[in-house]
Amino acid sequence: MKRLWALLIKEFIQMRRDRITFAMMVGLPVIQLLVFGFAINTDVKHLSTIVFDQSRQQEGRDLLAEFTASEYFDINYVASSYQQVNDAIEAGKAKVGIILPPDFSQNINHGRSAAVQVIVDASDSMSASSAISTAQMIGQLKSQEILLKKLENSGIKKFEQPYDIRIRPWYNPDFVSAFYMVPGILGTILTMTMVMITSMAIVREREQGTLEQLIVTPMRSYELMLGKIIPYIFVGYVQATLSLIMGVLVFDLPLQGSIGLLYALTTLFIIASLALGVLISTVAKTQMQAMQMSFFIFLPSILLSGFMFPREAMPKLFYWLGNVLPLTFYLEIMRGIVLKGIGLEFLWTQTLALITFIVVVLTLSIIKFQKKMA
């Protein structure tokens, strides 16, 4: 313990001297959380829309008002020809084009089906899917409204739909994107900083020759590993605490579950990320190599963990590759505790996965480090 305590003091002194790196580790996560928390929004609204209304009747204006009221479509342009609609979408000025035919009002008034053409720029698949689903929903609701009026005019006062589907969204009933994204952003921030900073810090010591001085001291390999990991655990606590405070104050993030359990399992995730950084440091020979290897871990963590895309939609190979990444399990833990309020009885598989990852990676790191010492 005396040897380990001396190494910990040395690490904290070195961390205090490198004020720029320490400020980046503490300040950048808060900035990234604010930027990404506001910027990343899966609920795509206010799509720029161009309208070519050939009917110029009240029925057409009523339908367009429904599109505007949904807040998904902003009618910024009014066209007088098909070519203008084409040009606006090709130039990127409009994402959606709505075209009403000349006989639109006549078809509505005579009980015939009135065609409405909705052109969507599908080069952005997320915006396109949002526009298509919303346009279909508006069409269905408007059709039901017209049919109900016709039934009432024909003397039928009461009409019940064949299906009565009642949807009850749990945990995030208002579909607030920040509630889903902020826990994921916290996990990615911890992954990026813990893996990159740890790997580069150890490689930097090797380049400067100070690591060899530690090797010749009467310290065991695992003591040296713990001495490198423990100080950054406290840095991870600072990052997690600041991020949670910002999430609650800025994004109204609900904390439904146990804060103590959240910190306990966050500790496991921080250690897993640090262990991965230590393993990279035993392989990399320069800081540039360490940074490149860190990005090689960081990008798959974002893409395969379920942070940006649902894992259920991935091919089986990449779905199972995601099970190797600590961030995959931590996101399930974060969203489970923060949004669902569940406890360890539902999160024990994710906890066991993180513990297994820590044991395997730290063992490999110690073995690899011992070979370098030999």
Image (cartoon, rainbow, N blue to C red):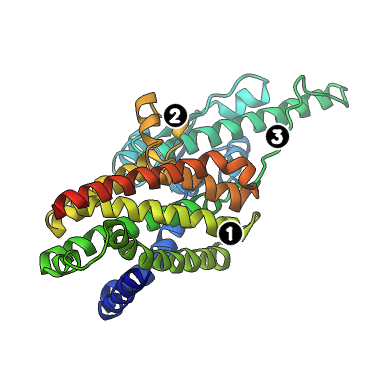
Circle nearer the N terminus (1, 2)? 1
Q: Is residue 197 left or right of residue 252?
A: left
Q: Who comes first in sequence, dot 1 or dot 3?
A: 3
Task: State which quadrant residue 277 falls in.
Answer: bottom left
Task: Kindly identify which residue carries mark 3.
Answer: 167
Residue holding disc 2: 313
Relative height, residue 217 to residue 193 (above, below): below
Q: Residue at x 47, y 43 (%)?
A: 329
Residue 268: numbered disc: none
Q: Distance between the residues labelled 1 and 3?
A: 23 Å
State yes or no: discs 1 and 3 in contact (Cβ < 8 Å): no
Q: Nearer the viewer, residue 317 or 278?
A: 278
Label 2 sits on a secondary structure element that is: helix
Q: Which residue is drawn at 54% across and 59% down?
A: 263
**Tag 1 residue:** 253
Quarter that holds the N terminus: bottom left
Residue 227 showing in the rendered view: yes
How many numbered discs?
3
User: Is residue 55 at all visible to an observer of this figure?
Assistant: no
Residue 122 is situated, as x and y percent measured from the top left of the image, at 37, 34
- Image-based side of 30 in relation to 294, left or right: right
Nearer the viewer's eye, disc 1 or disc 3? 1
**Circle 3 or circle 2, nearest the eye:** 2
The residue positioned 61% from the left and 46% from the top of the image is: 344
